[in-house]
Amino acid sequence: MIEAVGLTKRYGDKTAVYNLSFQVRPGAVTGFLGPNGSGKSTTMRMILGLDQPTSGQVTIGGYPYRRLPNAPRQVGALLDAKAVHGGRSARSHLLCLAQLSGIPARRVDEVLGVVGLQDVAKKRSKGFSLGMGQRLGIAAALLGDPQVLLFDEPVNGLDPEGILWVRNLMKSLAAEGRTVFVSSHLMSEMALTADHLIVIGRGQLLADMSVKDFISHNSADFARVRTPDTEPQQREKLTAALTEAGGQVLPEQDGALRVTGLPLPRISDLAHEADVRLWELSPHQASLEEAYMRMTQGAVDYRSTIDQRAGLQQPLPPGVTPPQPMPVPGQGQSGWYAPPPPQQGGQPFAMPQAPAGAPYAGGQAAGPYAAGPAAAPNPYAQPPAAPAPATPDTTQRTSEDPR
Amino acid sequence: MSAIQVVRSEWTKIRSVSSTVWTLGLAAVVTIALGTLISILSKREFDSLGAREQVSFDPTFISFAGMSLGQLAMIVFGVLVVSNEYSTGMIRTSLAAVPQRGTFLFGKVAVATLLAFVVGLATSFVAFFLGQAMLGEHAASLSDRGVLRAVIGGGLYMMLIAMFSMGVAAMLRGPMLSLGILMPFFFLISNILGNVSATEKIGRYLPDQAGSKIMQVVTPFGDDTPYGPWGGLGIMVLWVMAALVGGYAVIKKRDA
């Protein structure tokens, strides 16, 4: 078990990690999430005793790493896939690590087989792709058959087959009763792999809960309702009826309606009463990615802006109007993913212990809309032409933006 | 237990990169080739030398003339052994496996030092014998007084140069910075300080100038150096120890 208590790390006047306390339990995959620069790697380095915390402490099985007996047999880590001498072969790299930990050389060939690098074992790692580097790093972490495993962004650069393999590997390691701590900035990946989540932003703890709780607390369920495209007045009618009954209704780009706050049978009844035919009535769940974005949006350090290309553009010949670029959703609009602040409470997301309103209620419903087509995990109900966020959508977005 | 593991691991590391062969090979080849060349030239020049110079003619030291250049390759070897860990990021993996950082650093230094000594000693003997063969009738013999000390000292000198570089690299971490400081220091600053009369007295306490005293058999005419060959080597050892202690303090304290 990994336990951090009040972990803080400062570099000069920049605080990388602040007052972080969490536990990583054995027998489960614990996902460690946060935007770039949020302190994930710093925390990992502190767990491994590479960086000294400014205050607080982190222990593995009750010991600080540097005093852990037989540390390399207890803990395996993948920190950086590129942290390999390029001139050294994969096998030599693993061999020197094995010897450093007192692990027999035959184990090296074993792990090379496990990660599927046996054919390139004698090749210099200089020529390895990022994915092969990740496999080599995972092999190094597995060398000592450790009870505690740390992986920093293990799926970076892996192909789909590799991602699936890593996912299953993590799960099987956890199923064997090991402690598995995996960092990532991809919520969707963690939702599939992890049992428990620790989310940090700007070095501070944002959430520490099971994936199940995270899903039920942070993803607003909604219903997709479609009235006949040929009769727009039916849509207006239904919108009015649903709003009157206490639901929140948001139009989608393709003309469907996104309804929250009303159960499906009630929507059907209301439509029936209003004498509106329905083409579609389907349950949906907003993606976790979006809940995660909402949670961390205040804590993102590096935000992209529009590329101005000053001085790079050709002067236009006289009389030619410059082409109007089509706006691309998510580019240059701060808070594209960010929905309007939920409710009056100002609680940016729901923690299990926090008495924030039911996931169905209130302004959170606006969230799913903001992510557009990305937030519809149910392929069954997906109309074929959905992902076409063109100009009208963006204008709607900006007018809706509170800023 | 972990010291032996570190040594085994470091031996694998040093064996499995080609820079080891290149740097050590270059150090040997340059030292031997240049020493031989200067020995040939010295033999031709001998008759035109003044009486004083002929008296203080030191055939052993002349055959080691290539060391001033060959030591640069030795410096590169020492720097790369340590700073490779930092430039590749391997240091994190290594220190995660050996949380005892002192054991790690000194295990690494021990392996590289031993290798540098073996190569240095072989280089020294080959340079001596080839040099003496070129010098003909002016040649010294290994059984002459002080000659064996000088030849073994040549190996020790190369080893200490590599150790000093490892200590400096452990302090500075990056290969570029370490080489950028060590190369001009040994190639220029030390020579300039040693040859300008005003700074000569300071210059001879620098590691390379003090250490190279061990390779001298005949004291040059008018030399007033206050220490002998072993004293000079002792001064160099102090420099090496200072560099290694500094490197140890850095690796112990700083975040990897």
Image (cartoon, coloured by chain):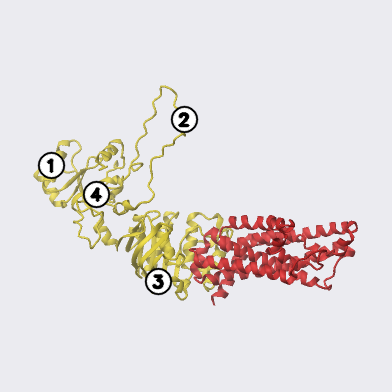
Residue type at mark 3 is Ile
Q: Earlier in the sequence, mark 3 or mark 1?
A: 3
| Residue A231 in view, yes or no | no
Q: Along the line of sight, which residue is nearer the eye, A33 or B79?
A: B79
- Percent across and percent down for residue A177 are 37, 72
Look at discs 4 and 2 and give the one toward the viewer.
4
Kindly report the distance in space between the C-alpha atoms of the residues bearing marks 1 and 4: 24 Å
Kindly report the distance in space between the C-alpha atoms of the residues bearing marks 2 and 3: 59 Å
Kindly report the distance in space between the C-alpha atoms of the residues bearing marks 4 and 2: 42 Å
Q: Which residue is mark 3?
A: A60
The colour of chain B is red
User: What secondary structure is found at the residue carrying circle 2?
Assistant: loop
Residue type at mark 2 is Gln
* Crowd around label 4: few <14 · some 14–19 · many ≥20 (10 Å): some
Q: Quadrant of residue A169?
A: bottom left
Q: Earlier in the sequence, mark 1 or mark 2?
A: 1
User: What secondary structure is found at the residue carrying circle 3?
Assistant: strand
Q: Earlier in the sequence, mark 2 or mark 3?
A: 3
Q: Earlier in the sequence, mark 3 or mark 4?
A: 3
